[in-house]
Amino acid sequence: MTTQPHNHIVKSHDDERNRIIGEILRMGEMAAAQLEAALDVVARRDDKAAERIVANDEAIDTLEREISHDAMTLALRGPLARDLREILATLRIASDIERIGDYAANAAKRSIALNTSPPLPHTRGLHALGMLAVAQVRAVLAAYRDSDAEAAQQVRARDAELDAEYTGLFRELLTYMMEDARAITPCTHLLFMAKNLERIGDHATNIAENIWFLVHGDDNLPPREKRDETNTAS
Amino acid sequence: MTTQPHNHIVKSHDDERNRIIGEILRMGEMAAAQLEAALDVVARRDDKAAERIVANDEAIDTLEREISHDAMTLALRGPLARDLREILATLRIASDIERIGDYAANAAKRSIALNTSPPLPHTRGLHALGMLAVAQVRAVLAAYRDSDAEAAQQVRARDAELDAEYTGLFRELLTYMMEDARAITPCTHLLFMAKNLERIGDHATNIAENIWFLVHGDDNLPPREKRDETNTAS
């Protein structure tokens, strides 16, 4: 290793950079845990726990604001071109994680409404979809931790599975609503929850694309076919 | 006016700053126009026009990437503390406008699916909700142009109207679905479209909060009651 001039400054810059990466991973794990907890309260029909999840979302929002601030401060005192790419990607990744947290909190909130109706068999399908979303979030956080563009690319490719699962559940719910009018209100909540889980997959994909961008720059991202078919389902 | 040292550099920095503000306003107007066009194609049941709106969303996405890049580049060569607040707000506002564009494109996409079923009376209610959303977007862009925190605050307060309108439409659609099972599939599209319009209102509110932040700094934002009641409707 060659010793560079101002090595102590570069070192402290790198330390701060690593600290921010650590904070993003912590934020990501909070969002993943919120999502798992939300899926759990839906299954257990636990209103009190659902309210705690909704309240916990504030901590993720606060962390995003702190990370954005710290990443910008770091950019403003660091070397120009190298940081520009990294800071932009960092801000976007933090924002995507923040949205994942929002969707988790929203699932918890809707579970409270769901609990005023008798249990529906489709709640299990929702849980399966949600576990796929959790797996995608965890996989993309690991790819970020390891700066692994290949692993990120795999997360992006697997989003199609989540979309297929969502489309299946969406159609099942529609059929069920047609068979039993009393199921319409609770099924509507399940429809929105399923849509939010599908959107979490999209945010994991966004994070994957930003990892690719971090590692390889803005070009050469392989194309990917579009996903959720229910927008155009008739 | 006093002449300052390095005035030409400050001038060029301000020019670039004003150019970025102009680009954000242009991006915002594109999103508002996309939203109006989407509402129009829903009413006219025009699939071809809907496809054009979906394709046009790409231009907004591209503009957001350019603005983020330019805003960061400007921050990296500008005075530190003043810019930090402004750049963060700029990135967030650009991101909110980008999401508004996405929701407009999604409404256009869903209209194509809607056109495979006979027309529904509730499409008019959706249009009214959409026009409220357009008005909020235009009002918040004007507040941004004028750095008017008071006007931004009014946009934020008016979001409750949009939420009330959404909640009314949501309940109406549920009732209609219960009365006629054949309406369930098209009403589901209307439900998602209505939810997206309500979300556009939230993004206008986010922009309003960032304008407040730009003008007054991070503190003193007056509290505001939470909005969409359908998350917890049973």
Image: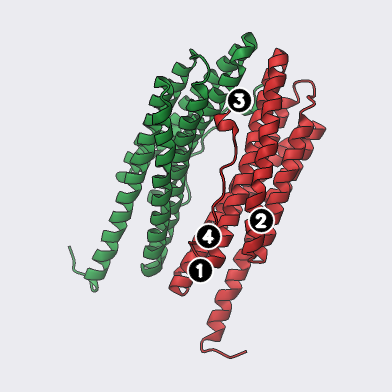
Chain colours: A green, B red
Q: Amino acid at mark 1?
A: Leu
Q: Output the chain of dot 1.
A: B
Taking B18 as reference, is A23 left or right? left
How many neighbours does mark 1 have within 10 angstroms: few (below 14), some (14-19), or many (20 or more)? some
Name the residue at 72% across, 41% down.
Answer: B130
What amino acid type is highlighted by mark number 4?
Answer: Ala
The quarter holding residue A124 reads top left
Disc 2 secondary structure class: helix
How much space separates mark 3 and mark 1, taking CA atoms? 41 Å
- At numbered mark 1, what does the secondary structure look like: helix, strand or loop? helix
Furthest-top residue in this view: A179
Q: Give the labeled residue for mark 3.
A: A230
> Which residue corresponds to mark 4?
B89
Q: Which residue is mark 2?
A: B154
In the picture of the structure, the residue carrying the numbered disc 1 is B74
Q: Residue at x 63, y 44 (%)?
A: B200
Distance from label 4 to label 3 (Cα)? 34 Å
- Horizontal side of A171 relative to B171 (left or right) equals left
Quick one: B205 or A15, which is closer to the camera? B205
Residue A110 shows which numbered tag? none
